[in-house]
Image: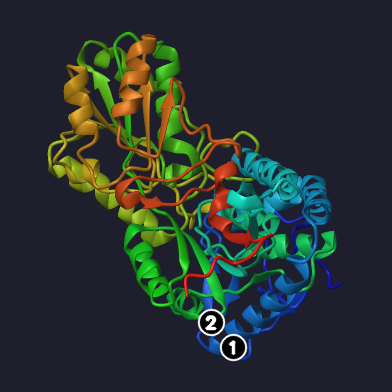
């Protein structure tokens, strides 16, 4: 097998990596683009340097990848669940073995700090192990019918599934989508975000080494046009998309033309409600975790922080003090706790939200400005100081729209009924959170919040065993957990007659 793309990270540091290997992968190998035209630069967020050139896949390349995946699916789907499980467990072992290298490459391509990236790789490994464990448990049901007849059900694979990933968790999402798909006997063609193309290619190499049939996990690079080709292809049975609401709508519309199954994990503007009877120390930790992971670029972040009026002064004092103490800088250094945003346009967008919030009456208690690290090689990076906004109102742009940056909007409230009504007054419904010592209140509020997940006295704790997905315009379908098997398989009913057929004619 060709040298792994991971080998390019050996000895590399921030600002030194250049990737020249082909970024596509199908038929068990990396594939060069047919043409070099329309190449787009991929930037290293921490420095603004060009990491590599990405050439989007066209119709012929997408066709090759899907045909490769379909051939592999025919072989893979005939294997027993235990046979598939053994291969997936080997993939998990390789992920764990190369944990540090994968995390390092993720940091260079994504900009998040190494501490977070290592956790992301660990979660990917756990996800692979979880679905490997489920591969051998996919069973049907026996149904007794009158006269000795019976029926049984079979849970069968869908075929070729398409995964379309996001830039905030590139490696983890490649596993989150592919592991349940493969456990059910499917193949997957995966399109990473064009801003973070590298670590999905690592996952393809790992699957190859673990022993999957060539083509079972393919990587095609590109943007909207490549995604359109994938969604329209007649051999694609299902599309799983993570990204923005507008793009999710387009994916759904395109997939509908072929009556393809769709899972959409879209944006959010999640409420985090902090009652006066909470453990304030835990609530402050929760608010920080709910807003500043991955530079605030997390779809389920609790970016509308509702704090009961009586404890607002204490909350703001402490949360601002800790926000100011967040170490921003070189994401490969162990002491860094916030790296760079994904791109210059995303940085400008987040800064623009802060500017607009101030014009609408909010006050920035800290941050909200471009951050320039002292290290000269980071001068061109996309850094921003984490921001806490007070005096926010429900009608402000920063409160209504998803910022996808390190900006916490804090709002006061007085009563439980009032805050639930305000929390639900959004088109989104991905996540929510509540901090309180009152166990009755905690469950009562969780029931009334219109969101796919509600965290009680915690936030952004999402292990693989737990289903994840949204209400309303945050999408539908679920990822993670046992229920995801339902979204990567289909049920066949077989009816067996042991006697004579009843004749009405």
Residue at screen point 79% across, 70% down: 213
Q: Position of residue 372 (x, y in %)?
A: 45, 47
Residue at screen point 44% across, 20% down: 457
**What crowding class fits label 1: few (fewer than 14 Cα within 10 Å), some (14-19), or many (20 or more)?**
few
Query: In terms of depth relative to the viewer, which is nearer, 19 or 71?
Result: 71
Classify residue 418 as left or right of residue 410: left
Query: In terms of depth relative to the viewer, which is nearer, 318 or 71?
Result: 71
Q: Quadrant of residue 301?
A: top left
Please identify the quadrant where the N terminus is shown: bottom right
* Real-space CA distance between mark 2 and mark 1, rounded to the nearest whole angstrom: 6 Å
At mark 2, the secondary structure is loop
Q: How is the image coloured?
A: rainbow
Q: Position of residue 423 (x, y in %)?
A: 24, 33
For disc 2, the marked residue is 39
Query: In terms of depth relative to the viewer, which is nearer, 145 or 256?
Result: 145
**Whether residue 12 is visible:** yes
Marks 2 and 1 close (CB-CB < 8 Å) = yes
- 452 in relation to 472, above or below: above
Classify residue 2 as left or right of residue 414: right
Query: In terms of depth relative to the viewer, which is nearer, 446 or 17?
Result: 446
Q: Position of residue 363 (x, y in %)?
A: 20, 33
Q: Position of residue 263 (x, y in %)?
A: 46, 57
Which disc, if any, is residue 172?
none
For disc 1, the marked residue is 36
Classify residue 83 as left or right of residue 420: right
At mark 1, the secondary structure is loop
Residue at screen point 79% across, 53% down: 91
**Whether residue 22 is visible:** no
**What crowding class fits label 2: few (fewer than 14 Cα within 10 Å), some (14-19), or many (20 or more)?**
some
The tally of labels here is 2
């Amino acid at each position: 097998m060709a040298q792994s793309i991971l080998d390019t990270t050996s000895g590399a540091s921030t600002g030194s990596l250049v990737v020249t290997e082909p970024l596509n992968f199908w038929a068990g190998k990396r594939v060069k683009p047919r043409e070099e035209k329309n190449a787009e630069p991929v930037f290293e967020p921490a420095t603004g340097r060009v990491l590599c050139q990405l050439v989007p896949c066209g119709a012929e390349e997408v066709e090759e990848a899907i045909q490769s995946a379909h051939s592999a699916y025919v072989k893979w789907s005939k294997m027993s669940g235990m046979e598939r499980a053994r291969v997936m467990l080997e993939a998990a072992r390789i992920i764990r073995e190369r944990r540090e290298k994968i995390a390092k490459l993720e940091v260079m391509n994504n900009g998040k700090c190494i501490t977070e990236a290592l956790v992301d790789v660990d979660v990917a490994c756990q996800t692979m192990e979880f679905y490997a464990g489920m591969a051998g448990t996919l069973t049907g049901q026996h149904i007794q019918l009158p006269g000795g007849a019976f029926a049984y059900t079979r849970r069968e694979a869908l075929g070729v599934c398409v995964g379309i990933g996001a830039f905030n968790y590139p490696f983890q999402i490649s596993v989150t989508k592919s592991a349940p798909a493969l456990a059910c006997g499917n193949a997957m063609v995966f399109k990473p975000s064009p801003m973070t193309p590298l670590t999905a290619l690592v996952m393809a190499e790992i699957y190859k080494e673990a022993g999957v049939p060539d083509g079972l996990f393919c990587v095609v690079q590109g943007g909207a046009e490549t995604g359109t080709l994938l969604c329209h292809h007649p051999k694609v049975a299902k599309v799983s998309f993570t990204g923005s609401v507008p793009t999710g709508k387009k994916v759904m519309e395109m997939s509908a033309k072929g009556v393809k199954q769709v899972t959409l994990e879209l944006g959010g503007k999640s409420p985090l409600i902090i009652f006066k009877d909470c453990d304030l120390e835990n609530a402050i930790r929760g608010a920080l975790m709910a807003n500043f992971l991955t530079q605030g670029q997390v779809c389920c972040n609790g970016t509308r922080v509702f704090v009961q009026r009586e404890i607002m002064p204490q909350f703001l004092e402490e949360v601002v003090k800790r926000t100011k103490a967040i170490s921003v800088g070189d994401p490969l250094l162990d002491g860094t706790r916030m790296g760079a945003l994904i791109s210059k346009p995303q940085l400008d967008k987040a800064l623009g939200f802060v500017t607009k919030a101030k014009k609408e009456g909010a006050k920035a208690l800290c941050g909200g400005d471009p951050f320039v690290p002292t290290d000269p090689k980071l001068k061109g990076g996309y850094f921003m100081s984490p921001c806490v906004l007070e005096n926010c109102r429900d009608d402000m742009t920063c409160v209504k729209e998803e910022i996808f940056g390190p900006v916490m909007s804090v709002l006061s409230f007085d009563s439980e009924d009032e805050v639930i009504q305000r929390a639900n007054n959004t088109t989104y419904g991905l996540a929510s959170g509540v901090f309180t010592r009152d166990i009755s209140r905690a469950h009562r509020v969780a029931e009334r919040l219109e969101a796919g997940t509600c965290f009680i006295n915690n936030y952004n704790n999402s292990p693989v065993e737990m289903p994840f997905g949204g209400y309303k315009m945050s999408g539908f379908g679920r990822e993670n957990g046992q229920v995801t098997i339902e979204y990567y398989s289909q049920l066949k009913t077989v009816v067996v007659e042991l006697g004579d057929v009843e004749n009405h004619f």
